[in-house]
Image (cartoon, rainbow, N blue to C red):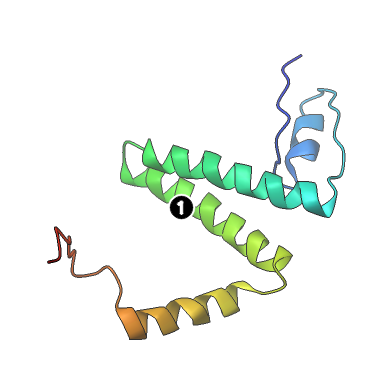
Amino acid sequence: MPTYNKLVRDKIPDIIKDTGKKLNTRILSDQEYILELKNKTQEELQEYLNANNNEDALEELADLLELIHALAKVHGSSIEEVDKLRRTKTEKRGAFDDKVFLIDVE
C-alpha cells in the first residue's frame, strides 16, 4: 500500500473509495493544517516550475490559487482581502507587466 502522508483536496478520499480501494485518513489540528498547507504550496509551486506547457502550468496555478484561498482563511482573512492588498501594492509599487529586470544600483 503506497504511503502519502500529505494534505489532499476534500473529495479525494471519496474518489479513492469509489475505485474500491481502502484508505486511512485523519483530520489535522489547526497548527498541522497550516504546516501542511505550506508544504502543499511548495509541492504545487515545484510542479508549476516543472510544467512543460501552458495547460500544465495553468493547472498548477489553479492548485496554487486554491491553496492561497485556504491560507487566507486560516490567517483570518479572505481571498478578497488578499486581492485588495495586492491591488494596493500594485498602485504603490507597480505590477510585473513591464518585465523590468533590475541589474544593480549604485
Q: Could you say whether the residue bearing mark 1 is in a helix, strand or loop?
A: helix
Note whether 1 is above or below 5 in the view shown: above
When asked about the image quadrant of residue 7, the answer is top right
Dot 1: few (<14), some (14–19), or many (≥20) neighbours within 10 Å? some
- The picture places residue 24, in percent across and down from the top left corner, at 86, 28
Quadrant where the C terminus is found in the figure: bottom left
- The picture places residue 31, in percent across and down from the top left corner, at 79, 51
Amino acid on which disc 1 is placed: Leu
Q: Residue at x 27, y 68 (%)?
A: 96
Q: Residue at x 73, y 30 (%)?
A: 5
Q: Residue at x 62, y 42 (%)?
A: 39
| Residue that badge 1 annotates | 61
The outermost residue toward the top is 1
Looking at this view, is 18 or 88 the one in front? 88
Q: Is residue 78 left or right of residue 64?
A: right
Q: Is residue 92 left or right of residue 5?
A: left
- The picture places residue 83, in percent across and down from the top left corner, at 51, 76
How many numbered badges does the structure rendering display?
1
Note whether 19 is above or below 13 in the view shown: above
When asked about the image quadrant of residue 102, the answer is bottom left
Note whether 86 is above or below 41 in the view shown: below
Q: Is residue 8 left or right of residue 64?
A: right
Q: Is residue 12 left or right of residue 103?
A: right
- The picture places residue 68, in percent across and down from the top left corner, at 58, 60
Q: Residue at x 69, y 44 (%)?
A: 36
Looking at this view, is 8 or 35 the one in front? 35
